[in-house]
Image (spheres, coloured by chain):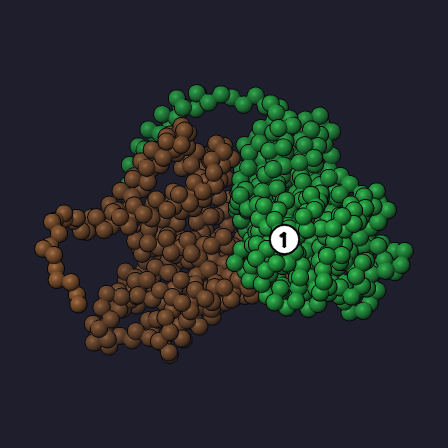
Chain colours: A brown, B green
Amino acid sequence: MVLVTPALALALTLLTGLLLFGAMGYAPLAVLFHFFIAPLADLYGVAELMVKATPLVLCAVGLAIGFRANVWNIGAEGQLTVGALAGGALAVWFPDGASPLMLPAMLLLGIAGGMAWAAVPAFLKTRFGANEILTSLMLTYVAVLLLSALVHGPWRDPGGYNFPETVLFPPAATLPLLVDGTRLHLGALLAVAAVIAAWFLLARAVFGFEVKVIGLSPAAADYAGMSAARITWLVLLLSGGLAGLAGIVEVTGPIGQIQPTISPGYGFTAIIVAFLGRLHPLGILVAGHILALSYLGGETVQVTLGLPQGIAGVFQGMLLFFLLACDVLLKYRIRFSAPAASPSKPA
Amino acid sequence: MKTTLKILTAALSALLAFTLTLTPAAAQDLKIGFVYVGPIGDHGWTYRHNEGRRAIEQALGGRVETTFVESVSEGQDAERVIRKLATEGNGLIFTTSFGYMNSTIKVARQFPEIKFEHATGYKRAANVSTYIGRFYEGRYVCGRIAGRMSKSGVVGYVASFPIPEVVRGINAFMLGMQSVRPDARIKVVWVNSWYDPGKESDAAKALIDQGADIIAQHTDSPAPLQVAESRGVFAFGQASDNRAFAPKAHLTAIINDWAPYYIDRARAVLDGTWEKSDVWGGLATGMVAMAPYNNDLMPRDVINDARNIEEAIKHRRLHPFAGPITRQDGTLAAAKGETLDDKTLLSMNWYVRGVEGKLPN
């Protein structure tokens, strides 16, 4: 059942796509081919898929653990940004750094930065009962403005004519490539490692059990002596840390410097990825690549067929729509019944 | 699920054999690709670049074919999109935002036979040219008009990001205004966005409340114009002739016209004469142009004066950044008889005297 809905949703999306493109006057099969298959025609394309999926998977894995515990971290985008800043600071301050410890230190700082940003909603929720949906979301805007202030100000490349970007990171602060001639970097392996670790935590560790119990029945968890506050802290730190890792991986990997734009909304798209992957780490690995493919496909049909840019968004929207609809319709049956004999109007 | 996918893939590929053979092969001499940072319907920056692309198609008709990718993020996506255009056989690729600079250079290194044109950047290579408009020339003309039209002598400036291009515009506007009104003042609000109608209109309202009776903008939406219209003050449009948005406020606008440059470069590739260059096009080359002056709002002599200034800049009798220029902090940027060179203009990060507030950097 868990796999039926996504498969069905995918099939329905493809089918609707066929009809839609046919109606728009394009050769529907050609569009689907260029959207879903052509981007992966060569090694570079496959590598790009993984490069694009990496930040999505990293963010989504952390978010999913929180969602299972009913902790709604909506601010992965902000945690990602602060992670990129915290780790990237090293390369900005030591642009000639060559130490082999530089990159590991940056990655750790990135994780710490994301955690620190997620610690704020954790504190506000456990101490004052503040809603983490609002606090984590609002901190995203703070993070993005912080990024903007730094790249427009003190972190500008001194040789860069005052344009808003930092120096290009030195090789010692750049993730090693896994395949020559592509942009596939070590971060992709880190994402896979995060998936495996998260699966282990959820399926085999006491922590995972606590997360589930708290998510399903806070009262039962309380009765069993589990601390909701402790789990709130842990899942927020975990998701913040993974989002921070995603951020530092982006700037030490494919971007190679800090710019005013680090993420085109990975932290938010990761929410879709988490649900498409059924909040399961392995599912998220697959879902992250499907979403990534929708971006690549969107670019490809623009280049090769001249389709509008909104196509990628249409596919993403249809996918989520069908997923939710299938969920509901598989679990519930629609009953058509005559309206009940007019109920007495409330006075 | 994997097997289902495989079957689906196989079926699709088989069917495609048909569909693809039906598509006529392209017979053009040159394919040209464009990378846009915004949507083509933004009525600002990207819209104007897309007009340039369409102008190429009109001018060179059957010899070229153009494609574009819009709303490309300046993060990791840029490099992939540029490379994609390169592998799809485009012989000339325009990357139209500053944030694409390093990606353009990287991809250009891998495709030495393809020509690249990067707007607003400063890194070049054997197959990478850069180009930018001297929009400050138009800003100077606007400032001059503001000096003649303003009663309070206070201009409200809705600005995007504190990058040199925008700072240069503010300063040029100020110098133009001071040339007829030495006591002129400019108040600036930074909205930290190129396109955010909500923030832009809030900024315009705040500026008018502070006494500005003319609104200038370096953001892409028509919102500041509409605020000016409803509050009964004058304003200048951005990138396109936006008079339709605010007929009772719109005095003129600085138009970005990339068409002549784009057609030139495409023709150069077709003729085999393309060479790396760094072009700053202004009023003289037509890359910058003034929208028709609004003669319902501007007196005859103000319009004539603006036209004279335009001509003077075109024929190099006047340079907006000719000295004496005093910085906000009182130091001298250019003495009388000196003119700021392009390198100083490229990296400008200080206000001239009369601009209020602190430059956020």
Q: Which residue sits at x=24%, y=50%?
A: A327
Decide: is B116 above or below A238: above
| Side of A201 relative to B42 (left or right) | left
Q: Which residue is mark 1?
A: B249
Spot occupied by residue A256 in the image (x, y as percentages of width and height): 58, 53
| Side of A259 relative to A268 (left or right) | right
The N terminus of chain B: image quadrant: top left
Spot occupied by residue B330 in the image (x, y as percentages of width and height): 81, 69
Label 1 neighbourhood size at 10 Å, few (<14), some (14-19), many (20+)? Answer: many
Q: Which residue sits at x=49%, y=52%?
A: A264
Viewer-proximal residue among A162 and B214: B214
Q: Residue B169 lies in what quarter of the image?
A: bottom right
Decide: is A291 above or below A222: above
Q: Which residue sits at x=66%, y=61%?
A: B213
| Side of A233 relative to A52 (left or right) | left
Amino acid of disc 1: Ala
Which chain is home to disc 1?
B
Q: Is residue B212 visible?
A: yes
Q: Residue A122 lies in what quarter of the image?
A: bottom left
Total marks shown come to 1
Q: Residue A258 lies in what quarter of the image?
A: bottom right
Q: Secondary structure at mark 1?
A: loop
The C terminus of chain B: image quadrant: bottom right
Q: Is residue A170 visible?
A: no
Viewer-proximal residue among B6 and B217: B217
